[in-house]
Every structure is written in structure tokens, then in C-alpha cells.
Image: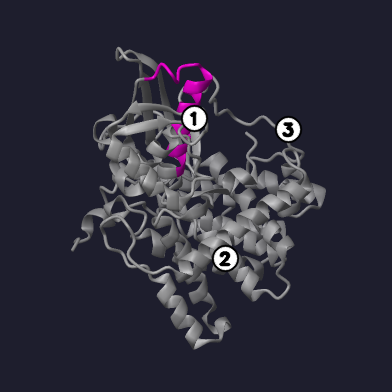
Amino acid sequence: MAISVFDMFSIGIGPSSSHTVGPMRAARMFARRLKAQGLLTQTASVRAELFGSLGATGHGHGTPKAVLLGLEGYSPRTVDPLGVEPVLDRIRGARRLRLLGDQVGDAHEIPFDPDRDLVLHRRRSLPYHANGMTLCAYDTDGVPVLEKTYYSVGGGFVVDEDAVGADRVKPDDTELRHPFRTGDELLRLTRETGLSVSALMLENEKAWRTEAEVRAGLLEIWDVMQACVTRGLKTEGILPGGLKVRRRAAHTAKALRAEGDRASHAMEWVTLWAMAVNEENAAGGRVVTAPTNGAAGIIPAVLHHYAASVPSADDDGIVRFLLAAGAIGMLFKENASISGAEVGCQGEVGSACAMAAGGLAEVLGGTPEQVENAAEIGIEHNLGLTCDPVGGLVQIPCIERNGMAAVKAVTAARMALRGDGRHHVSLDKAIKTMKETGADMKTKYKETARGGLAVNIIEC
């Protein structure tokens, strides 16, 4: 399967790539399929059912909102976060839904009661993946005209149950110049070609886009990351969801600026940049999945560290960082999982830490072997990390966890650069271990909010 760096980094909204971005895309695919098959005007009602982790923590992750927005035709990449609530208020107030309502000339209005027509099954799961959802459209006689099951498999990726028809999500069979599936294959190719990890990735990306388009697209990703950090550093208040979690990034940023001498507080800033992003994510703001929303703060924080602390940092370095990080992310996606509902938070924060470590090692002059070593260190010390969000919200421990992992990524890159790339545990073996650990992990520790901190905190 050919995976692009733009599959690993995509623009969306918070709070979750698998619970918000993925379901929004799936619901939009369903509505567009109704239109493509000439069934839109025949549709008199729609029922949506969420299973597994989507049902267990859907409210905390904004999944019901995402489904409504997707049915109305909104895309997570382009929807205005500030315009979301008015749309939802209109649907709830009128109890009517405009299928593809954001597209002029395509809207088809139907009755829709979110309390009745959108069902969250807290303890029922579908067979393929923990994040399953079924959508069904009915005619005026209550006869189904279209029923589809989708799985949100992490990072905003959506898989159609039967993988047929207009909305098929299939393995990309694009022929790449330097295809690889494992870390060992990646290192072999860099030795054979003499290319760095980022340069080899760039050659592969040219199968889809020109070099100029790749660079422009990655710099747009960086722009969105920077804007997210900026918003997070200046926005105060209480995060939505009921836990009354106070935003801390803005206040801490003021304190750090007052103390001056950023270099002496470098790791505090790394922590702060990551937390700023994840506070924005928790508030439903625009973020970049990197590779998921729950871990969205780690790579931007380490990129900010590179830009702030390396005198030679420039746009070319940003591009090389993201290309190298994307290569590492593909290995996780291809050989294990980046879904917290499937393997726990080690698949989200752990993979993001490895990606950030590898990207930083790349732009600091590391060899491919040192890049691979940095990524291995990053994931090795996140193995076994559970996904236990308190209240089903991407807030506790998620926000702080991003800050901790960002610092860990910087440390991993530094450790790898002090060595020669030789080490006992390969990245491939660490990823295999992560997959096996996730399989052994009890379901209650995998984004269900039924284990760990989620049940051992006293809510006041």
C-alpha cells in the first residue's frame, strides 16, 4: 500500500482524528453516495449508529456533532470551527437535517431528531475495528434505500466495510520509485541510493505531486501548525466538556516571556507548544493530525523547537523534517496501528514521539541509521501506554501527555545523534512489540474511558 506524507498529516478539527475527523468524513461519504446513486431525493430519514469506542466515548470526542456536520456535507479540512455551533443549534432546534446542505443546489432536507436518530451503543462493537459506525437511509415507507458501515481506523482514515462502489477506500497502488514497508527496507534503500530519509521520501512523493507541490503542501501544513500554536498561546478560559479543565498555555507563556532567556527554558517551551496545540484540539479548533488529533501537539512542538533553537533553520528544514517524520509514521500505519482504540495511546502519542524524534534527527544532520535509532528510542519508551481519557474527553491526561512526549522526542533525537546508529532493538522490532502489546491490552484501556485514570479520578 502506497501511503503519502499527506495521509499522515491532514488538516482537520478537534478533538479527535478517529472520533471527529473520521466520522465526519464517513458521514459525508454516505451523503455523497446517496446523491451519486440518485437516492438523495428518495431519502425521508436517516439513522446513524455508533459502536465500540465511538459509542463509548463519542460524546466526549464530539462524534455526534461530526456525524451531523458530515451528513450536511461539511469537510473537516474546510469547515469553519467558529461556524460549527450555529449549524448544530439549527439542526437541534428545528430537528431537521439538510443532507449536503453546504452545497448549493444539492441540499435535501429531512426530519432528524439527534436524540432518536443518532444512537451510541456504549457496549456493542462491530467486528472489524473498535471505531465502527453504520448509517442507513430510508424512504417514506421506512424501507432502507442505502445502508453502509464504516470504520474510522485512526488518523482520520476511513475504511468502507465492503470496499465497493463510489466511496471505496482502497489500498493505493501508485507505483513509487523507492517503495518500502519496513525500517530495514528504508535503511537499505538509503544505502543503495545514497539518499537521506527525507530525500528518498521526496522522490516517492513525486509519484503524486511535483516537487514544488510537495513543498508548498508541507509548508501549508506548517502554517496551520503555527497558527494553532499561536491561538493556543493567547486563548484563555475553560475547555468544553464538563470537566472544567482550565487552559494553561496562555498563562504559562506570559510567565515564561517575563522570565526571558528562552534558551534556558527551552524544554519548558517545547512542553508549552505541545500543550497549546492540544488545548486548541480539545476546544474543537483547527489542527493538523500528526498522525492523530490526540497526539497533534508533539510534532508542531518539536518543529517549533527546531525553528527557535537552530540558527540555520529554514523552510527547507521544515520540509525535510515532515518528510522524514512521515516516513516513520508510515511504518507504524503499515505494520501496527495509530489508533488509540486499537492499540492504546502508544499508537498515538508513541508513534508521534517516534516521528518527531526521527524528523528532528534528520534536520540536525543525522544519518539514516541515526534517524531510525531516534524513532526507535521515541517509541520504545512509550510502549504499553494506555488510552484512558477521563470523561471520554481528549483533555486529561492527553494534553499534558503531548507535552511530555514532545520533550521525550527531543531527548531521543539527541541520544541518537550522540551514537553511530547502531543499537540492539530495531525500529521494526519496537513497532512489532507495540502491535503485540496493543493486542494484549484489555479493551478498557483502549479509548473506552472504562479503565485507568478514567475511573480512578474523583470528579468534583
Q: Quadrant of the N terminus?
A: top right
> Marks 2 and 3: in contact by CB < 8 Å?
no
Residue 127 is drawn in which quadrant? top left
Numbered disc total: 3
> Marks 2 and 1: in contact by CB < 8 Å?
no
Instruction: Residue type at mark 1: give it.
Output: Met
Of callouts 3 and 2, which one flags the residue occurring earlier in the amino acid sequence? 3
Which residue is at a point 67% across and 50% down the rendered structure image? 217
Instruction: Residue type at mark 3: give it.
Output: Glu
Of callouts 1 and 2, which one flags the residue occurring earlier in the amino acid sequence? 1
Q: Residue 243 has which mark?
A: none
Instruction: Residue type at mark 2: give it.
Output: Val
Residue pointed to by mark 2: 302
Which residue is at a point 55% across and 62% down the rendered structure image? 227
Residue 262 place in picture, x, y as percent = 56, 82
Work out whether residue 224 or residue 412 is closer to the camera in this orientation and state it.
Answer: 224
Residue 5 place in picture, x, y as percent = 64, 46
